[in-house]
Amino acid sequence: MKLETGSGMKAAHSFRVEVAEAALDQIRSQVAGYPWHEMPDDGGWAYGTNLDYMKQLCAYWVEEFDWRKQEAKINHFSHYIAPVGGIDLHFLYEKGSGPAPLPLIVSHGWPGSIVEFLDIIEPLAHPERFGGNKEDSFDVIVPSLPGFGFSGRPSRPIGPRKMADLFNSLMTEVLGYQNYLAQGGDWGGAISSWLGFEHSAACQGIHINILTMRHPDGPQGPAEETWAAEFERQQQMENGYRTQQATKPQTLSYAMMDSPVGQAAWIIEKFNSWSDIDGDDLESVHSKDSLLTNIMVYLVTGTFNTASWIYYGRREEGGRLLSSSGKRVEVPTAAALFPAEILSWPPRSYAERIYNIVRWTEMPRGGHFAALEQPELLIDDLRSFARTLR
């Protein structure tokens, strides 16, 4: 299968991340002045984000964190904004090396951002700089989801299905690609699924490191039924945020939009629970700089509220169900199974009723934030999959 590269951009203008110093000063002031409170003596992380860790993180935030250094890293790549479906979509765009780089759209989720992918963009676009071959290169497109980060917001909540429509328009109409690949985890996995399901004329394959979709017939047989029961058990202590954001996101927004520490704690809890870390040592995988840069994207753009809308939008779109009639994604699909993924993978038999699985890789380590936790494993698997489509 030959994928064709785009001929140019239409109606897009260049963009740079430039946060006013006054905005940074206000965030630092709010963090420094946060009125710390108590937690249970036996707390650890069991009741939510650990108080001692938050105090350490916030001290670093105020005294040592350098946003300008991180801003320069973000601006190392070319950024654009294009109007798509009435929304100004922000995206990073790195043209690949070699004679025929494959167009690849990589989508983040919540509580992530484009920051997740900063360290994989260059290896994907220019493998020869990292000991690889130019023939494996991609044109890499990394959008901020509508309502997230530097993208504009919809007038009301939309879910991953509608976002897939917008991203297909970005790839085909704005960037001029006839064909492309899609990759994603978290909401990006759902968006990629919808791209493969409803936009297969252009989306020629998907690579996902999460399974968020469901089949209408439910689990079949003992192995699948065991997985389904265990999945529900695992999610009992994780469903609170999801239920709130899918039902009453506006109520949550008043507290969160007022407190940088509150937003940070809400997000940090997920990085601790969902990552493949050593015990509760969050920094065995994620650095303070990486964590804070991702949090700062929400803060400097004021998008915590509108980013949470995707949960409400997905509920209105029909939840996790891909097709009520049992149709599946027929484009070639690669599944990358990281063992600490909080939304545990089903047996392959279940996944194959939803996707045309052509590659099934059980990773030796890693969790929900694959591009941050195990970038080399993700890159290698994506390259191997793409070779079958060139």
Image (spheres, grey):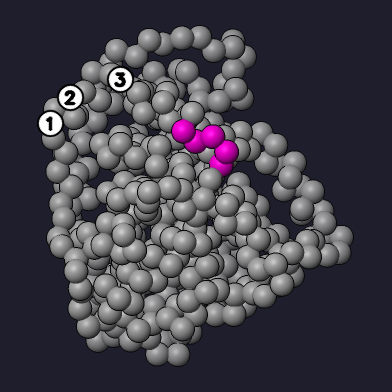
Q: Is residue 86 visible?
A: yes
Q: Please tell me which of labels 3 and 2 falls first in the chain.
A: 2
Residue at point 70%, 67% (across, down): 324
Question: Pointer 2: what residue?
Answer: 25
Q: Position of residue 11 (x, y in %)?
A: 19, 69
Residue at point 16%, 39% (across, down): 19
Which one is in front, 4 or 318? 318
Q: Residue 31, which numbered label?
A: 3
User: Is 26 placed left or right of 131 in the picture?
Assistant: left
Which one is in front, 288 or 354? 354
| Dot 1 crowding, Cα within 10 Å, few <14, some 14–19, many 20+ | few
Q: Position of residue 267 (x, y in %)?
A: 45, 35
Could you tell me if the residues under marks 1 and 2 are in contact, i.e. CB atoms within 8 Å?
Answer: yes
Q: Amino acid at mark 2?
A: Asp
Q: Residue furthest right?
A: 222
Magenta stretch in the rendered image: 246-250
For marks 1 and 2, give the CA distance. Answer: 6 Å
269 lies above or below 327: above
What is the quadrant of the N terminus in the image?
Answer: bottom left
Q: Residue 21, which numbered label?
A: 1
Residue at point 14%, 60% (across, down): 14
Q: Amino acid at mark 3?
A: Val
Q: Please tell me which of labels 3 and 1 falls first in the chain.
A: 1
